[in-house]
Image (cartoon, rainbow, N blue to C red):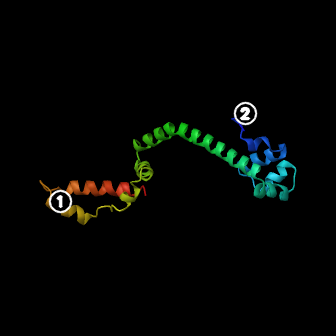
């Protein structure tokens, strides 16, 4: 048998007005007790609907799914603004936090966590291998830069 209005699930058509209020309350995070108070029925009644009424369960699942889809649409709309903020932070005076966020969100955080900050000894070894050798002033400049960046942790 075909539904008359395919945009409204059959389960929602069989709900009482009280059940519909309870579905909305539960779907938006209310407890069974809170949903019962909003609906004007006992907690046991809402609990019965929740645990033993397939129409109620289907309507609740459909409402939660609808709310989730709406949330995803809203989040997607915020992505360009969020990227603008992160980009501005990267161009700011202390970009380390934004850089770490990007590494974390893109899955590079685990790889980045395994990279240790070079010590003065590492830099001295690198200076010996470098062509031409690093000057003490350049080594100190690099160490100072690393120290400043390390403060952002």
Looking at the image, is mark 2 or mark 1 nearer the viewer? 2
Q: Earlier in the sequence, mark 2 or mark 1?
A: 2
Q: Which residue is mark 1?
A: 127
Q: Percent x, y for residue 144?
A: 31, 56
Q: Nearer the viewer, residue 117 or 115?
A: 115
* Mark 1 neighbour density, 10 Å: few (under 14) some (14–19) many (20 or more): some
Callout 1: helix, strand or loop? helix
132 left or right of 22?
A: left
Callout 2: helix, strand or loop? loop
60 left or right of 92?
A: right
Q: Which residue is mark 2?
A: 5
31 left or right of 147?
A: right
Q: Percent x, y for residue 10?
A: 74, 41
Q: With respect to residue 8, does 95 lie above or below?
A: below
- Quadrant housing residue 128: bottom left
Q: Percent x, y for residue 72?
A: 58, 42
Q: Residue furthest left?
A: 132
């Amino acid at each position: 048998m075909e539904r008359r209005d395919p945009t409204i699930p059959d389960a929602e058509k069989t709900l009482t007005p009280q059940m519909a209020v309870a579905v909305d309350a539960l779907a938006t995070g209310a407890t069974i007790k809170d949903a019962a108070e909003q609906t004007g029925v006992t907690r046991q009644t809402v609990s019965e609907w929740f645990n033993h009424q397939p129409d109620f369960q289907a309507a609740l699942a459909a409402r939660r799914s609808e709310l989730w889809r709406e949330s995803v649409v809203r989040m997607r709309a915020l992505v360009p603004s969020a990227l603008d903020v992160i980009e501005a932070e990267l161009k700011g005076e202390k970009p380390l936090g934004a850089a770490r966020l990007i590494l974390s969100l893109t899955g590079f955080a685990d790889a980045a966590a395994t990279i240790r900050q070079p010590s003065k000894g590492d830099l001295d070894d690198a200076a010996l291998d470098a062509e031409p050798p690093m000057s003490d002033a350049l080594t100190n400049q690099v160490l100072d830069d690393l120290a400043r960046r390390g403060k952002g942790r």
